[in-house]
Amino acid sequence: MDDDYYMGLAVEQARRAAREGEVPIGAVVVYAPVDPATRRPLAEPQVIATGRNQRETTQDPAGHAEFLALKEASSKLGVWRLTGCQVYVTLEPCIMCAGLMHQSRIDRCVFAAPDPKAGALGTLYAIHADERLNHRFQVESGVREKECVAMLRDFFRQRRDDKKRARS
């Protein structure tokens, strides 16, 4: 799988979120089933869902990019078990989204930037590797990290500047 390519699609979603006034976080779900015995691909990988932050737009606390993408993927596949799916997201998932990844049985999550305030796939928690849970999944990080960190930094800097101008 081309992690850089799929993360690029997630970055596009994040940029779209920023244009809509949302925190720039984007996600993509790729369906790439493999034979469990041989680990060989059973089908060509395909993007089955995308998501971007929409909390402000929808006033929905669950309006996170990866949450929305996972719901769309489940709807498209017609199942809640997303075995064979990989999630690409521009920021390390929070505990809610990591929990949904666990519950939906994804195979792998690739995130760009760690989240020191809410990261649940290694930074603050490691839900994906918790042996007390009935499912574990692979996690990779750092794909296009600098680009995604810069996008978040620039977004919040602009927000702070806008607030300062509004007060003046």
Image (tube, rainbow, N blue to C red):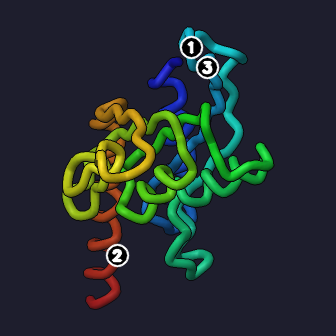
Q: Residue at x 52, y 55 (%)?
A: 103
Name the element at disc 2. helix
Instruction: Kindly indicate whether the residue at mark 3 contacts the one at mark 1 (C-beta within 8 angstroms).
Output: no
Label 2 packing within 10 angstroms: few (<14), some (14-19), many (20+): few
Per the image, the residue denoted by label 3 is: 34
Q: Residue at x 39, y 33 (%)?
A: 138
- Observer-nearest of 120 and 47: 120
Above/below status of 44 relative to 29: above
Which mark is in front, 3 or 2?
Answer: 3
- Observer-nearest of 157 and 136: 136
Per the image, the residue denoted by label 1 is: 37
Q: Of callouts 3 and 2, which one flags the residue occurring earlier in the amino acid sequence?
A: 3
Residue 76 in picture, x, y percent from top left:
78, 47
Q: Amino acid at mark 2?
A: Asp
Q: Amino acid at mark 3?
A: Val
Residue 127 in picture, x, y percent from top left:
33, 52
Per the image, the residue denoted by label 2 is: 162
Residue 119 in picture, x, y percent from top left:
28, 56
Tag on residue 85?
none
Q: Quadrant of residue 143?
A: top left
- Observer-nearest of 31 and 79: 79
Q: Amino acid at mark 1?
A: Ala
